[in-house]
Amino acid sequence: MSPAGDAVPVSASDVEAATADTAGTPSAPGDARPPVPLARPVIGEAEERAVLEVLRSRHLSLGPRVPEFERRFAQRVGAAHGCAVSSGTAGLHLALRAVGVEDCAKEDEVVTSPFSFIATANAVLFEGATPVFVDVDPETLNVTPDAVASAVTDRTRALLPVHIFGYPADVPAMERLGLPIVEDGAQALGAVHADGVPVGGHGHSTIFAFYANKQLTTGEGGLVTTGDAAVKQRIDSERNQGRAPDMQWLDHDRLGFNYRLSDLHCALGLAQLDRLDDMLEGRDRVAAWYREALAPLVARTGLELLCEDRGGNRRSWFVYVVRVPHGVDRDRTIRALADRGIQTRPYLPAIHLFAFYRERFGFREGQFPVAEDAAARGLSLPFFPEMTQAQVQRVVEDLTAVLAP
Ligand SMILES: Cc1ncc(COP(=O)(O)O)c(C=O)c1O
């Protein structure tokens, strides 16, 4: 289906123009209220200054901002090392290669979640391996250690849990399976495991992503944290065309890619790191406003919210996703909200039901019912750190008018 033909346009990435500043554009014909965008990055003078400094230095790539960003980001999540890369997807690719998911046969398997952004599973396909999906927990929407254990075979090469919607997956329990783990933390910067360790701090390669709707943005970009110096060395080389740090110009000792992140991006990332606590607090505040304002609608209609933190796990709020009540047409809800100037998206489609996954692996409906239900009913509401309480009220009023007039 072409994006232009969709009732709800969906772009190459998960939240396209949603991050553009749409203030000032009328909501809808006849509606004078400003629209409420889906997402909006926090960008101020510090970011402008940081990028300008790099521009003026003329050292735009392979410069000092890259290791500085890596060091400070890794420190922030309690990891020994960080490797800046051009996207979260690039990070997944290199992190999987570094644990041996490389040049695989179709029989080589990686156990992961069907309820994630498609990049998670695509990265497994890049190296010819097969993603083995297990259904997610109905509360956390993450894969559980038991479900993962039940899918492990002698062909399993790695586990790839996702901290979906910023809620920590139980990685410490998955460690007992004794297999290499790569964590998809693209949506989870700032999340904390029950044991007090931040997501990314458990020593496994963990990827983060910096598209403009994320908790921290560099425009586009990603970073892999790891506790293993050899993994750091390998990823640093493979992101830079297979060149080791001590090698001569244009000398390459392995297959590599161009997955580098520029100094401009890293400077932006450093400025964002300085304000990360404030941005995370802003997200927590907006989520709390939503929870309170939505309570009557939850009680009246059966609208479902994301789970509360439990057992010491702490969500880092990335998106505010609700599940429309059973029997409600989610896509019609999106169109009705768009008519009122509220930008929302279906979030997330289940990966196994994309046509090319069905064709390639024979997946079909009904295999992962929890993921499929979350995918069918999931609705991402406007959510960003600088959202005002009045905007939250407006979204909730419009959602109420659409769902329970
Ligand atoms: C769970 C998850 N994994 C991977 C990615 C890929 O990151 P990127 O878009 O930077 O390639 C995303 C991006 O949104 C994501 O949400």
Image: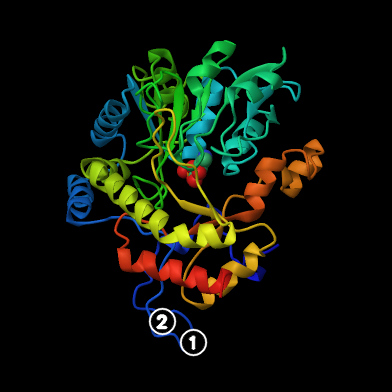
Q: Is mark 2 within 8 Å of ligand 1?
A: no
How far from the left and from the top, in percent, is residue 234? 45, 19
Residue drawn at 59 percent across, 68 percent down: 333
Residue 106 lies, with reference to residue 351, above or below; the image says above
Crowd band around label 2 with a 10 angstrom C-alpha radius: few (<14), some (14–19), many (20+): some
In the displayed structure, does residue 192 sit left or right of residue 350? left
SS at circle 2: loop
Q: Nearer the viewer, residue 242 or 367?
A: 367
Residue under pointer 2: 26
Residue under pointer 1: 29
Instruction: Inspect the image, locate mark 2, and give the three-letter code of the amino acid beneath it.
Output: Pro
In the displayed structure, does residue 53 sit left or right of residue 339? left
How far from the left and from the top, in percent, is residue 148? 64, 23
Residue 228 lies, with reference to residue 374, above or below; the image says above
Q: Is residue 351 visible?
A: no
Residue drawn at 37 percent across, 18 percent down: 247
How far from the left and from the top, in percent, is residue 141? 57, 39
Instruction: Inspect the image, locate mark 1, and give the three-letter code of the amino acid beneath it.
Output: Pro
Disc 1, disc 2: CB below 8 Å? yes
Residue drawn at 60 percent across, 35 percent down: 137
The figure's colour scheme reads rainbow
Q: Distance from label 1 to label 2 (Cα)?
A: 7 Å
Crowd band around label 1 with a 10 angstrom C-alpha radius: few (<14), some (14–19), many (20+): few
How far from the left and from the top, in percent, is residue 282? 29, 51
SS at circle 1: loop
